[in-house]
């Protein structure tokens, strides 16, 4: 069966890799991108819907597909305004889940974060936890919430603090085993491949943490 996929966040690190992989995946004939700016040079397989995705409801008519891949996320440094931060990290994924439910999309995958907890006193973790709860409350037939640790990969934008943090974690990784294994860096490519694998599997597992993300990525047939 030829499928249609929706990607939210296709200009970000993980979303851009996901787009690259879906472009070479023959199971998908159409890829819909919803974003605030157009990406140049994409093949006709890609349909782009440009506008304010903070107002995702405006796209309801075109928000139809077999699967939704939600790769939306910001950082405290990039978005210091907590109100705007919540509109992005909570509002967009939750609105997307509501639209998916309303339009009968049976598969929804979203990137959250390790440590997401709606009861947390940490704003970031609390926001992610609340997002997970709200998405899961839509009871979409097949929902997968991926909880990576710190995400590694080549970003276009320079994040000095993040680069230092990644370097420190890389140095400490040999000591992360047993229960600490989940804190190892999660590669953006692994997240993208794991999402594709999950979307095309019969797995009913809801919460996917970093060790499982790596295993799912290794099993994905799209490895180029």
Image (tube, helix red, strand yellow):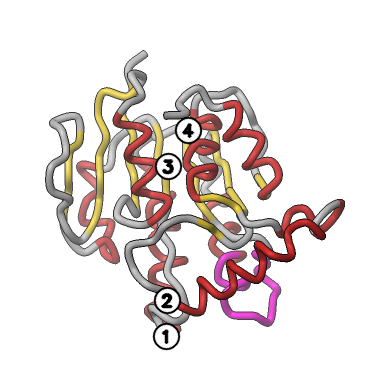
Q: Nearer the viewer, mark 3 or mark 4?
A: 4
Q: Which part of the image, by quadrant, shows the C terminus?
A: top left
Q: Which residue is mark 1?
A: 80
Q: Name the mark on residue 196.
A: 4
Please, what secondary structure does the residue beneath circle 2 have?
Answer: helix
Q: Tag 4 or tag 3, which sits nearer the N-term?
A: 3
Position of residue 30 measured from the top left corner of the image (x, y, whole percent): 24, 29
Q: Which residue is mark 2?
A: 85
Q: Residue placed at 57% from the left, 42% from the top? A: 144
Q: Residue placed at 60% from the left, 31% from the top? A: 218
Q: Residue placed at 40% from the left, 86% from the top? A: 81
Q: Are marks 2 and 3 in contact (CB under 8 Å)?
A: no
Q: Are marks 1 and 2 in contact (CB under 8 Å)?
A: yes
Query: Eyeballing the image, is 83 above or below 89?
Result: below
Instruction: Judge the density around disc 1: few (<14), some (14-19), many (≥20) Cα neighbours within 10 Å.
Output: few
Instruction: Judge the density around disc 3: few (<14), some (14-19), many (≥20) Cα neighbours within 10 Å.
Output: some
Q: CA distance from mark 4 to mark 1?
A: 32 Å
Q: Name the mark on residue 101.
A: 3
Magenta stretch: includes residue 127: yes
Please, what secondary structure does the residue beneath circle 1 have?
Answer: loop
Q: Magenta stretch?
A: 115-128
Furthest-front residue in view?
171
Q: Nearer the viewer, mark 1 or mark 2?
A: 1
Q: CA distance from mark 3 to mark 1?
A: 31 Å
Furthest-right residue in view?
178
Position of residue 157 measured from the top left corner of the image (x, y, whole percent): 34, 68
Q: Quadrant of residue 73?
A: bottom left
């Amino acid at each position: 069966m030829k499928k249609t996929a929706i990607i939210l966040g296709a200009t970000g690190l993980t979303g851009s890799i996901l787009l690259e992989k879906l472009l070479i995946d023959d199971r998908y004939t159409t890829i819909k991108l919803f974003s605030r700016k157009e990406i140049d040079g994409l093949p006709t397989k890609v349909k782009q819907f440009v506008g304010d995705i903070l107002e995702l409801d405006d796209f309801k008519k075109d928000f139809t597909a077999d699967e939704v891949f939600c790769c939306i996320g910001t950082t405290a440094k990039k978005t210091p305004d907590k109100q705007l931060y919540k509109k992005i990290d909570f509002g967009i994924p939750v609105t997307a889940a509501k639209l998916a439910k309303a339009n009968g999309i049976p598969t929804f995958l979203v990137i959250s974060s390790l440590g997401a907890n709606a009861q947390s006193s940490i704003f970031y973790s609390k926001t992610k936890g609340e997002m997970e709860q709200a998405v899961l409350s839509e009871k979409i037939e097949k929902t997968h919430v991926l909880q990576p640790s710190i995400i590694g990969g080549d970003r276009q934008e320079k994040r000095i603090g993040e680069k230092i943090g990644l370097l420190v974690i890389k140095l400490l990784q040999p000591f992360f085993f047993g229960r600490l294994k989940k804190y190892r860096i999660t590669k953006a490519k692994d997240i993208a491949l794991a999402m594709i694998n999950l979307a095309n599997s019969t797995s009913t597992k809801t919460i996917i943490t970093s060790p499982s993300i790596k295993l799912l990525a290794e099993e994905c047939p799209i490895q180029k």
